[in-house]
Image (tube, helix red, strand yellow):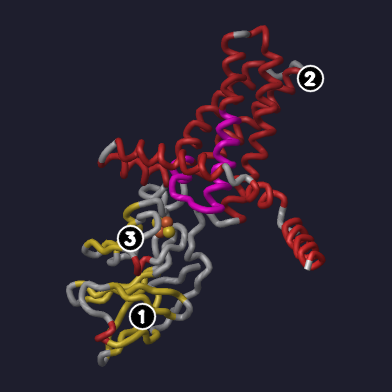
Amino acid sequence: MEIDRRVIRRLIRQSRSQERLLNRFVRSLTWMDGVGQALQKAVGWFYDGLGAPGKTIKNLLHGTNVLGHPLHPAITDVPLGAWTVGVLADWLFVVTGRVPAVAGDLALAVGVAGAILAAITGFTDHHDTSGFELRTATVHGLTMTAVLVIELVSLGLRLWTPGLHMTAIVVSSLGWLLALAGAYVGGHLSFGIGTGVNHNAFFAGPMEFVRVGTRDDFPEGEMRRVEAGGLPVVILRSKGLLRAMGAVCAHAGGPLDQGTLDGEVVTCPWHYSQFRFSDARVVGGPATFDQPLLTVRERGGVVEVKLAHPLQ
Ligand code: FES
């Protein structure tokens, strides 16, 4: 019995060590969940406190309304790019003296401005994560916040204590190295575990009409989930007309057919993104991508759907 337990423990240790180091590290930080949830509460209170404009501002910062694409990853290029230029300029100034000291200072300041916007958009996105994704997003967010503080210290030293310019350069260089680590975690968050990715990106769906039921399967004012060519689809009969869109929420895969309906707008049960049945457009974040739109036809009591346009 004792031998069996030892074998099992060894197998568990082995299987854990086969997981990538970053995932193992994040998985070990169980205390991080409490921190992440506290941050989510604070962000939620902030937007709720703004009243009706809070929802609009939050949508804007997710990238829902203007971009149709997550805003945060685009913004992060600014601080990473500026700080990289800054570190290069700083060390060229130190080593060669052929680059003015102010070049590194300016690049650092631009990076700090971009990082503040990146932090605002990042913690807005962080608000709508859960589980392992939340823990990874918290590690990423706190690392980048630490970087921002380090870079602000460096900027302060440059502005108010010119005699410590060399110290400021070392501080911002260390901050840049930490930023690379934080950005790696951010990359893993998107590309490794799919945060912010369109959750309909890998479906195909039917380009020709396929049968999904009969007229009686779709009563007025109710949503029904069907499968069409491998694509989960939610169908609504509204004012006699049938509307259809992908049933998997683009944000994180929530089941839209289990959401709440207000007229022709469905609210996802997971993080409350909203989609309009008439054109499958996202009308409320955190989702930033539209749903797959399907054309519906009824012929002889048979209901058929096909994609209104290809998904890829
Ligand atoms: S899964 Fe997040 S809003 Fe739908």
Q: Nearer the viewer, mark 1 or mark 3?
A: 3
The residue that disc 1 covers is: 305
The residue that disc 2 covers is: 95
Q: Please state which amino acid type lies under the numbered disc 3.
A: Phe
Instruction: Determine the CA span between mark 3 and mark 2.
Output: 56 Å
Instruction: Determine the CA span between mark 1 and mark 2.
Output: 67 Å
Q: Earlier in the sequence, mark 1 or mark 2?
A: 2
Q: Residue at x 37, y 87 (%)?
A: 211
Q: Which mark is residue 275?
A: 3
Q: Earlier in the sequence, mark 1 or mark 3?
A: 3
Q: Percent from the top left, x then y, of residue 86?
A: 65, 26
Q: Which mark is residue 30?
A: none
Residue 239 higher or lower than 164, as above or below: below
Tags 1 and 2 in contact by the CB under 8 Å rule? no
Q: Secondary structure at mark 3?
A: strand
Residue 149 higher or lower than 56, as above or below: above
Q: Please state which amino acid type lies under the numbered disc 1.
A: Val
Q: Residue at x 44, y 79 (%)?
A: 206
Tags 1 and 3 in contact by the CB under 8 Å rule? no
Q: Nearer the viewer, mark 1 or mark 2?
A: 1
Residue 43: quadrant of the picture: top left
Q: Quadrant of ligand 1?
A: bottom left
Q: Please state which amino acid type lies under the numbered disc 2.
A: Val
Instruction: Determine the CA span between mark 1 and mark 3.
Output: 19 Å
Region rendered in magenta: 123-148
Task: Say which quadrant the N terminus sits in.
Answer: bottom right
